Image (cartoon, helix red, strand yellow):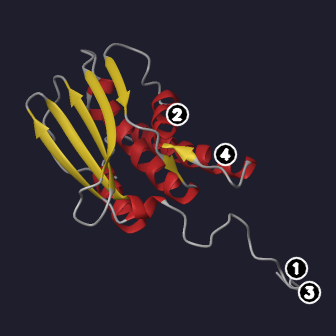
Amino acid sequence: ETAESLEDYVLHLETRLDSIHRVIGALVRDPDQTFTLRGLIEDELEAQGAYHGDGARLISGPEIIIPATAAQTLGLVIQEMVANSFQHGVLGSEDGGQLHIGWQIDQGAPGGPELRIDWTERGELPPPHRRGFGATVMENLLAYQLDGRAEWDFTPHGLRIMLAVPMASLTPEPGFDGTLPAAAPGDWPPATY
């Protein structure tokens, strides 16, 4: 972890756990729950207080339905981006700045249709002095859970992060109906623990 103090580390860990809790809590209440990309983004921005303070926030894109397993992964990736923006970017800047989060489906992507999410921060941002743990978490989550990728572009006027996830990774597996297989008589409860 690249936190600069124990307090920073604890706060970042708490926001990660809160993000996981929001998605899993919704699934406990409704196992067939699906999520929208806009809802995941807005929930995380609200949970971390991103709508308070100066600066413009713009969110735009078509409605994208996300199944539960992908929502858990994308929720954590979004949490990392929001937390990093508070720590290093426009969400934590006293000068405000602009945050634009937009998405679209790229039908012409080489491997088939993919969801592209563009996270753009404009404002006076300090240049990164090292690659943080959050970037590694984001890349690994996207790559291993959703066959996706992330690209960063730092400029003197801000930051752009582009996330790409194949649409095939955002659909439930064929034959999945949201239920668990029935147990055979005598399978539950187990005789020993």
- The answer for how far apart the CA atoms under marks 4 and 1 are is 26 Å
Q: Which residue is mark 1?
A: 188
- The answer for how far apart the CA atoms under marks 1 and 3 are is 6 Å
Type of amino acid under label 4:
Ala
Type of amino acid under label 2:
Asp
What mark, if any, has residue 26 been given in the picture? 4
Percent position of residue 148, x then y: 32, 61
Q: Which residue is mark 2?
A: 43
Choose between 100 and 49: the one closer to the eye: 100
Query: Helix or strand or loop: what does disc 2 sit on?
Result: helix
| Picture quadrant of residue 32 | bottom right
- The answer for how far apart the CA atoms under marks 2 and 1 are is 38 Å
Type of amino acid under label 1:
Trp
Q: In the drawing, does residue 155 fall left or right of residue 149?
A: left
| Picture quadrant of residue 92 | top left
Percent position of residue 135, x then y: 28, 52
Q: Residue furthest right?
A: 186
Type of amino acid under label 3:
Gly
Query: Helix or strand or loop: what does disc 1 sit on?
Result: loop
| For marks 3 and 4 on the same chain, the one whose residue lies earlier in the sequence | 4
Q: Residue at x 26, y 22 (%)?
A: 98
Q: Tell me the crowding category of disc 1: few under 14, some 14 to 19, or many 20 or more residues within 10 angstroms, Cα based.
A: few
Query: Helix or strand or loop: what does disc 4 sit on?
Result: helix
Q: Which residue is mark 3?
A: 186
Percent position of residue 97, x then y: 24, 19
| For marks 2 and 1 on the same chain, the one whose residue lies earlier in the sequence | 2
What mark, if any, has residue 85 been given in the picture? none
Contact? badges 3 and 4 (CB < 8 Å): no
| For marks 4 and 1 on the same chain, the one whose residue lies earlier in the sequence | 4
Q: In the drawing, does residue 32 fall left or right of residue 167?
A: right
